[in-house]
Image: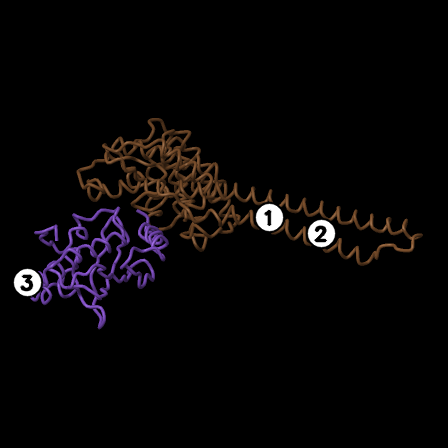
Amino acid sequence: MATGFATKRLSKELSKIHGNLPPGITLVSAEGFQEWLLDIQVLDSNPLYMNQTYRLKFKFSPSYPIEPPEVTFVSSPDRPIPMHPHIYSNGIICLDLLGQQGWSPVQNVESVCMSLQSMLTGNTKNERPEGDANFVANNRRRPRDIDFYYHDNTV
Amino acid sequence: MAGPEVNIDRGKSLLLKDQGNKCFQAGDYAGAEALYTKAINHDPTNPLLYTNRAMSLLSLSKKGSSEPQDPSAIPVLTPIQIENYEKVIADSLSSIRLHAENMKAYYFLAQAQIALHRPSEALASAKEAHRLCVEEIHKGGKGASSIGPITELVLRCKKEAWEAKEKERLDAQGGLVRELQVLLEKERDRRVEELHSQAATEMTDGEGVNVPVEEQKITEEYARKIEEVRNMGVAAGTVGEEGKRRNVPDWCIDDITFSVMVDPVVTKTGQSYDRSSLMEHLKRTPTDPLTREPLRMEDLRPNLALKEACDEFLEQNGWAVDW
């Protein structure tokens, strides 16, 4: 496939997105077509996430959207990593939608953000995944190469 | 693909062809072209030699222009490039004469024709290449890798065809504005003249009109009218080009590339995708993008009515190729 595949699709996503995102999702930066930053907020009164803003980093390969983007939370002083049994403290997200198997090319940046929003909204557990400290200390793999065990897709 | 049975010195010709292929792979397109020419001299009946030479000439011409990757820029062709593209056309046609169902030849033909700004011819060739490509895929051939670039080429031809038509329309409109302007100027002069002759006859009466003041009024009135006609022309031009530019209906958009569909195919969910992008997805994961149920290429059906609608939409809105 021609190299322009991802670029074309992303430039169209960008022109659709501009000033037209659902509530609680903000585009922070989209310089070039390799890496975008977006902020998301949980808008209901879930006490775990109230009044917080979280930052997402999307990394796109040249064959996006055939290949999934790499999506992680990134932390900064005012942007923590949300507490969730499927989100490691280094920002790596365990969500089947973002894996090689669960991804579909009809997904897009906006729909991924919305899925993550609802993943947070529905959560009541104030905890990290099992073995978080060990994973964060030892993992050197890219998120997309990790074979997560999707033990509970309803969370 | 098999070569023809009859030939003059087939062995020698094939040897030269192999040498040509090596040159081509090494990026020596001029060397490749010369070798294919020699190969043709030894066997003018092998259609592959013509497509190979066409491919060398295409690469040679593209290498010559500074920004071959940028489709939005209109490159100025050098005389050598023009000559090369004409040769590509001749070679492609020779190849098609020898072997009618020739996807490559139509693909090269379309590229040369679009480079020479002959969009309607190019579109016809690109469509034929697309048809043959889909046929080849159904037969299990290796057309799958070409469907993406061919689909893109069809879109580019559609855009240029629309641009040519749009330019004609705007030129015609510009002509109309100029014509109206001339008519208004004539009317202005006639009224000024009338004013002068009226003043001349009324000379004898004491209370004649103030000619310079009246003339000034008429001149101003017509200057305003001419300006208005011009503005209307500009506004109408804007409606044609910019005003409509914003709205691409969702029904014609492929959900994988977000481009207007060229060859929509429908899955059993009822959702349509462009054949080229869905195939790209199926190569990686043979599942329906929406339901993730198993989906094979053979399960796809062309969506003819939607194809018609997309064609018609692009005919009127060629800009949507790059929305």
Q: Residues within 10 Å of mark 3 (few under 14, many from 20)?
A: few
The residue indicated by pointer 1 is B233
Q: Chain of mark 1?
A: B
The residue indicated by pointer 2 is B222
The residue indicated by pointer 3 is A131
Say if labels 2 and 1 share a chain.
yes
Q: In what element is the residue under mark 2?
A: helix
Above or below, A103 relative to A56: above
Mark 2 to mark 1 CA distance (whole Å): 17 Å
Q: Chain of mark 2?
A: B
Res. B268 visible in picture: yes
Q: Which amino acid type corresponds to the residue marked 1 in the rendered image? A: Gly
Q: Chain of mark 3?
A: A
Say if labels 3 and 1 share a chain.
no
Residue B294, horizontal then vertical, whole percent: 17, 38
Residue A33, horizontal then vertical, whole percent: 32, 58
Please give the label number shown on residue B266: none
The letter of the brown chain is: B
Residue A73, horizontal then vertical, whole percent: 20, 63
Relative horizontal placement of residue B157, taking residue B181 as reference (left or right): left
Q: Quadrant of residue A119?
A: bottom left
Considering depth in this image, is B293 or B117 the residue closer to the camera?
B293
Q: Which amino acid type corresponds to the residue marked 2 in the rendered image? A: Tyr
Task: Name the residue at the right extreme.
Answer: B204
Residue B100, horizontal then vertical, whole percent: 38, 29
Q: What is the display colour for chain A?
A: purple
The residue at the point 49 percent across, 51 percent down is B75
Q: Which amino acid type corresponds to the residue marked 3 in the rendered image? A: Gly
Marks 3, 2: nearer the viewer:
2
Q: Residues within 10 Å of mark 2 (few under 14, many from 20)?
A: some
Quarter of the image with the N terminus of chain B is top left
